[in-house]
Amino acid sequence: MELDDTICYCFHVSKRKILNFIRIHQPRRPSQVSQCGGAGTGCGWCVAYLKRYFEESQQGVEPTEQLSPEEYARQRAAYIAAGKGTPAPGAIPLPETSDGGNS
């Protein structure tokens, strides 16, 4: 995933915004990353990514993902479909499935 790809689909927060927030504000705990536009406080899908970005920043490691933005969106849709979270009002819609409906 690239810097301008969305990480928090509920509140439209990009990877760039999250990494800049961590760099500038230097949160002391992973949960404080939620102060970046509410990231991680909607459906919860991105929380694992926010924690990883925080931990990697503490270690001085550059965050990288092997996922494409499309695969990231599909995995989030599966997470929502499994009942593990509810998107916030105004969240980026779930991707359409091959049968024409939402995931």
Image (cartoon, grey):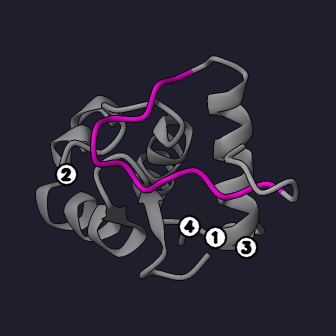
- The amino acid at mark 4 is Pro
Question: In front here: 6 or 74?
Answer: 74
Q: Amino acid at mark 2?
A: Cys
Q: Main secondary structure of the magenta part?
A: loop
Circle 1 Cα neighbour tier, 10 Å, few/some/many (<14 / 14–19 / ≥20): few
Please state which of the two labelled residues, at mark 4 or mark 3, is closer to the viewer.
Answer: 3
Residue on which the image places disc 1: 64
CA separation in Å, label 4 and label 2: 17 Å
Q: What is the CA distance from the residue labelled 1 to the residue labelled 3? A: 11 Å
Residue for badge 4 = 63
Q: Which residue is mark 2?
A: 36
**What range of the chain is rendered magenta?**
85-97
> What residue sits right under mark 3 in the picture?
68
Q: Is residue 47 found inside the magenta-colored segment of the image?
A: no
Eye-nearest disc, 2 or 1: 2
Report how far apart the C-alphas of labels 2 and 1 lie in the structure: 19 Å
Rendered residue at 64%/44% (across/down): 76
Give the mark nearest the N terminus, 2 or 3: 2
Of the residues under marks 4 and 2, which one precedes in the sequence?
Answer: 2
Q: Mark 4–mark 1 contact, CB under 8 Å?
A: yes
Give the image location of residue 70, x and y in percent. Answer: 71, 69
Crowding around mark 2 (Cα neighbors within 10 Å: few <14, some 14 to 19, many 20+) is some
Percent position (x, y) of residue 94? 58, 50
